[in-house]
Image (spheres, coloured by chain):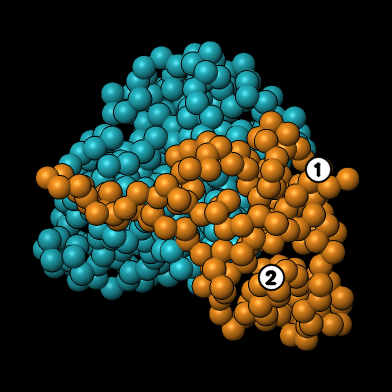
Amino acid sequence: MRSESSIRDQAAIVGTGQTRFSKSLGLSEYEMAVEAIFAACEDAGISPREIDGLVRYDMEQTDEEQLLSVLGNPLLRFFAGTGWGGGGSASVLVVAATAITAGMADTILVYRSRARGKQSSYGKDPKQGGRYWEKLATALPGLNQWHVPQGLVSAFQEMAMLSMRHRIDHGTTDDHYADVAIAFREHAMRNPNAVMRAPLTREDHHASRMIADPLRLFDCNIETDGAVAFIVTSAERARDLRQPPAVILAGAMAAGSHHIRLSTMFERSWEEDSPVRVAKQLYEMAGVKPREIGAAFFYDFFTSLVIIALEQYGFAPRGEGGPFAADGGLSWQGGRLPCNTNGGQLSEAFIHGFNNTSEAVRQIRGTSTSQVEGCDLVLVAGGNTDPTGAVILRRA
Amino acid sequence: MATHEDIRAPGARPSEPSRGEVPSPRDDHLTRSLPLPQPSQDNAAFYAATARGELRLQRCTPCRRFRHYPRPACPYCLSRDFTWEPSSGHGTVYTWTIVRGPTLPAFQDKLPYNVVDVLLDEGVHFVSEVLDCPPEEIRAGMPVEATFVPVTDEITLVKFRRCA
């Protein structure tokens, strides 16, 4: 169902910018943010002073105040943050499109700058670079008191438990995980910006050390520094700008209860799970079916979660995400669904999902190093935990 | 009964750098001591019970359903009337992982260790650990029962053991 005030087709990504990606860049998050933002403005052919809206992660450390002073003091009239980590990586675009549709701003900056290399810590706060989970408080008043004292301290351990349950229910195997890791590594090998470009075999995957059963090293995203920025404007104005626009055909967000509180997540039905709800809302707004999607970008923090996303977003029946990924199912060339053609967060970089969105825009522009033929519609999904969001981009 | 030595981190390294070493900011900020719950009014009754060696859960008065973690309203019927009722302490392993590292320094010396999601007979999920169970013997569906591990005067953690 589509109301007059729908965000459908109202906004477009018209500029993208990024820093280099590396396990350690030695740059501050502020510096990286500015580099990516200037690059995005130049790509769009606009001045940073034209920015009048801003959407960021609420955990982003480079805030409005810091940015305005280095962007030539643009006259900001809309600003917002989306919550809850990687689940929000596409929600920022949904919020930007909503603001554009409502006329709250014309030129919206969306960005993420992250010193997430494991040695890139620069302060005591878990949000200040490096591994957030190594800097937890020792007195836990919040909901993490129910699992951290038991030794479940980080996302990779929490997701290991979700992934294990998927194996118990559906028989997903190490080979399925390897299929995802290898497909994305092959994409990274074709991408000069990718951090991990050495060939990866099934044997390499299976021989990599177990981090938290069933997740091995090569099932986990890499730990890198970098920043990515986008300029979003109205679809109408996009027609007059420098780049072929990536029109935001549809967008959706959902929240149920937080994924890491396993105690509440497992009490919900599959249909109530936020990624499943986002998929339904998204396809409904877009008026498209999963089989019409040319390429998909899932939040590949772990191979197993890509397999689960394939099911949640309707590409594979429930429990059959693993077989879907097998035999090159996710490959840019001849795959059932080309996915994460940049190498994703498993092999290109881990910029909280934003580097995947960059590549989604390249697929729409036709400039990917692993360009999918006839790629008119691209799905970009945030971390498929809870809460989450997703968009479908299309060629103009 | 297990003692806190089983779960504390005796090997947690002191945060003082040795003479002549320049600490990196990263090392300086690591959490080295065991992170513990900080009880609040919403869950004080839970911790008071565990300190007595009892597992008590909130149970909704009108709809009779149990819930965990503690909260002031029932997620099913929205009633704010509840009592704290004893749990049987029995359940089965619903899902699990073996943490092999990296992990927090506080848990470093116990690697590898298991973390389990126990589906209690009362129908609620509870994240914990199965004591005295080698990693290769953890199984989904494994029956377990609650046991209590005092860590401080205020905090007793609920752990589990295998049972028939």
Of helix, strand and loop, which one carries label 1? loop
Q: Give the alpha-carbon distance from disc 1 to disc 2, as whole Å.
A: 23 Å
Q: Which mark is residue B50?
A: 2
Q: Colour of chain A?
A: cyan
Give the chain letter at badge 2. B
Identified at 28% across, 73% down, the residue is A77
Which residue type does callout 2 highlight?
Thr
Asked whether A310 or A51 is in front, the reply is: A310
Q: Colour of chain B?
A: orange
In the rendered image, is residue A290 in sight?
Answer: no
Q: Is residue A123 above or below residue B115?
A: below
Q: Which mark is residue A190?
A: none
Please identify the quarter of the rendering in which residue A17 is found.
Answer: top left
Q: Which residue is mark 1?
A: B142
Q: Is residue A336 above or below residue B137?
A: above
Q: Select label 1 or label 2 by which is in front.
A: 2
Identified at 53% across, 43% down, the residue is B110
Screen quadrant of the N terminus of chain A: bottom right
Asked whether A91 or A265 is in front, the reply is: A265
